[in-house]
Image (spheres, grey):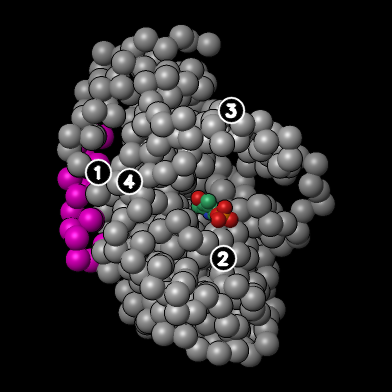
Amino acid sequence: MNNAEIVDLTHRNLVDIYGCLPIALARGQGSWLEDADGNRYLDFFCGLAVTNLGHSHPRLVRAVREQAERLMHVSNIFHTEPTARLAANLASRFGDGRVFFGNSGAEANEAAIKLARRWGHRDGGGRYEIVATLGSFHGRTLATLSATGQEKYHQGFQPLVPGFRMAPFDDLGALERSVSDNTVGVMLEPIQGEGGVVVPKADYLKRVREFCDRNHLLMILDEIQVGVGRTGKFFGYEHTGVKPDIVTLAKALGGGLPLGAMIAKSDIAASLTPGSHGTTFGGNPVSCAAGLAMVEAIDEERVLENATRVGGAMLERLREIAKTCDRITEVRGLGMIIGVVLKHDARPVVDACLKEHLLVNGTAGNVLRLLPPLNLSRADAERGLAIVERALRTAPVP
Ligand SMILES: *Cc1c(COP(=O)(O)O)cnc(C)c1O
């Protein structure tokens, strides 16, 4: 099928929720994608921070193929080696942790919320309320939607799940004032992704941690977008010197296969007892084999160093461009998550990049978000940034 045929067939049959671009992608290799008509694109989008090693990374392809040939699914009442090994890898990275596997970010956060409530009922004096932050994004299930601090996602889905309060992000005083006698924990992203690549002050997470410790509150970090190396460290919180009680991962964890994880300190995780939570597909051996290949590649192929070095150079170059480009108000980010904040909607700049076959994303209305593969070469970084610069200088202002 060609591009137009696939686009048309999609439009006629899928529930229309994604505002799709008119491109049907057929294959990918490294930082490059090809559509069904044979056009090539440089990928600074990565399936929304999922394909952190680029497309068809040989190590991932081999792991998935070998595991698919051997065994694709059993049930969580049996053990499999890839699941056991990935859990061990993640638990030891976190340090004295226990892992729950789901199939998506929303499921990982849903598990974190349920664990916090369970812990609250058992050890937390009956507390259940979670304070989340304005501008956050935690997923689309009803509970994770209720934890999401953006009203546009709530429209028409009320009533939301009770037990959530909102406080402004990067404002410790406001967070302190939002806590009540019923509060069991706080939930936030180390850098707000969908919210517009919002990087908090350097000591914010440390002060949230201290506040949680003083008040016997769980600190839950949603690292679904920034985890698995995106910021140049495996966990985003490693930049801050503090450790959360619960962290969630998904997006890049399965390298493109559906996989999410909630990792909790062992004593807290003990609140989830046999039969209290579960999912049929979570931690299936094929996704976990891909996840294992992902985390091993990150350790063995100097991926984090590259994300820090090339991402840092990109951030610098964009800040240089901003000095002579009126429509930019700020450039922010860390490693390979970069936001270019515009005075207007990002759409015309996204479209101008697309015309030159560079895939980028716009979020929070006016933020151009770059999420390149962590192993992006310097040459491709320069190629992509040349397109971004042209788009920033010439795209129409809406
Ligand atoms: C994408 C995302 C989610 C939701 O993940 P899904 O896999 O789409 O359910 C949750 N939190 C953050 C920070 C995300 O970026």
Residue at numbered disc 2: 103
* Residue 10 shows in this picture: yes
Of pointers 4 and 3, the one earlier in the residue sequence: 3
Q: Do the residues labelled 4 and 1 touch (CB within 8 Å)?
A: no
Q: Earlier in the sequence, mark 4 or mark 2?
A: 4
Question: Within 8 Å of ligand 1, the CB of disc 2?
Answer: no
Secondary structure of the residue carrying numbered label 3: helix
Q: Are the residues flagged by discs 4 and 3 in contact, CB closer than 8 Å?
A: no
Can you say whether 166 is above or below 40 in the image?
A: below
Question: Eyeballing the image, is 244 above or below 332?
Answer: below
Residue at point 54%, 32% (across, down): 2
User: Is residue 311 rendered magenta in the image?
Assistant: yes
Residue 295 visible here: no
Name the kind of residue labelled 3 in the image. Answer: Ala
Q: Is residue 398 left or right of residue 147?
A: left
SS at circle 1: loop
The CA span between labels 1 and 3 is: 30 Å
Between label 4 and label 3, give the one nearer the viewer. Answer: 3
Q: Where is residue 393 in the image (x, y as percent from the top left)?
A: 33, 12
User: Mark number for residue 376?
Assistant: 1
Quick one: 82 or 185, which is closer to the camera?
82
Q: Which residue is drawn at 51% across and 42% down?
A: 194
Crowd band around label 1 with a 10 angstrom C-alpha radius: few (<14), some (14–19), many (20+)? many
Instruction: Give the crowd class for mark 3: few <14, some 14-19, many >=20 residues within 10 Å.
Output: some
Residue bounds of the magenta highlight: 298-315
**Residue 90 sits in which quadrant?**
bottom left
Specify the amino acid type for callout 1. Leu
Reading the image, the residue beneath label 4 is 29
| Identity, as a three-letter code, of the amino acid under mark 4 | Gln
Q: Residue 4 carries which label?
A: 3
- Most foreground residue, 8 or 227: 8
